[in-house]
Every structure is written in C-alpha cells, then in structure tokens.
Amino acid sequence: MELKLEQIGVLLLNMNMCRQNVKKHFKKTNKDLIEQYDSVKTHLKTVLDINGFEGTETLISLYLSTDELKMVSSFISWYVPASEGVIKKAYGKVGGEDRQQLNALVSIKKEIEVALGA
C-alpha cells in the first residue's frame, strides 16, 4: 500500500494521541491487537525517520500485514466519528485543520480497503 508522507504523519500523530484509550479497549477485547498497534506505530515512525518531512506529497510504500491493515482500518472507523463528536461538542463544527486531518484518515481507510480488495 502506498501513502503520502503527509498521510503517514497524520496517522502516526493520531495513533500516538489515542494509545492509552486504545490500550484500554484492546485489553478488554483482544490483547494481541495492542502489539499490532504498537508495531504499526513503530513502522510509521521508522518510515518518517528515514524519509524526513520534506516532500509531503511523496508516495511511500508501506509493508503491513493484512491483520495490521484491518486493525488500522478499524482504528480509523472508530476514531474519526468519535473525534468529530468531541470537536462538534466543543466548537459547534469540525473545520480547518481538524477537518483536514480527519479527511486524511478517511482517505487512508479508502487506500486500505483497496489494498485489502474490499
């Protein structure tokens, strides 16, 4: 699967912000998923460390397992609506930078669906 550096950065940022909430949820449902979550975060960080932050439109190949792709897709499916709800409650609407980040996550989910053949 290929993503832009900018998308990789947005995904890593949001996964880092949510780790504690995700960890609590995975402990209740499937402890193995937290290892996948951390593995994906490590992979994304390595990709950004190697490629830097120049050329955010540059496409980068990510090598994630099917299970990791499904986990990221599930994370985005949970995270985007939850974030929209919190932002709307606080500010009355989702706009600007928040909307751009959420749209980037939705586009990542679409790329995952293509990669999985969904």
Image (tube, helix red, strand yellow):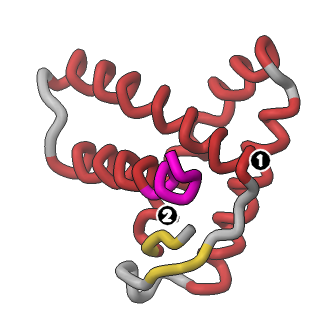
Q: Along the line of sight, which residue is nearer the eye, 89 or 58?
A: 58
Quadrant where the N terminus is found in the figure:
bottom right
Q: SS of the residue at dot 1? A: helix
Q: Which residue is drawn at 69% across and 18% down?
A: 25
Q: Which of marks 2 and 1 is nearer the N terminus?
A: 2
**Residue 63 screen position, x and y as percent:** 70, 68
Report the residue at 71% width, 60% height from top.
64
Residue 26 in the image: state x and y as whole percent.
75, 23
Q: Position of residue 89 (x, y in %)?
A: 23, 16
Asked if residue 13 can be seen in this view, the reply is no
Is 100 placed above or below 61 here?
Answer: above
Does residue 52 appear to the left or right of 28 in the view shown?
left
Q: Nearer the viewer, residue 111 or 21?
A: 111
Image quadrant in which you'd find residue 98:
top left
Residue 88 falls within the magenta-colored stretch = no
Q: Position of residue 36 (x, y in %)?
A: 79, 44
Which residues, given as a range, are shown in magenta? 111-118
What residue does disc 2 label?
Answer: 9
* Secondary structure mainly formed by the magenta segment: helix
Please tell me the numbered disc located at residue 38: 1
Which residue type carries mark 1?
Asp
User: Contact (CB < 8 A) between labels 2 and 1?
Assistant: no
User: Tag 2: Cα neighbours inside 10 Å, few (<14), some, or many (≥20)?
Assistant: some
Task: Say which element carries label 2.
Answer: helix
Q: What residue type is labelled 2?
A: Gly
Q: Is residue 2 left or right of residue 54?
A: right
Crowding near the residue tagged with mark 1, few <14, some 14–19, many ≥20 C-alpha atoms within 10 Å: some
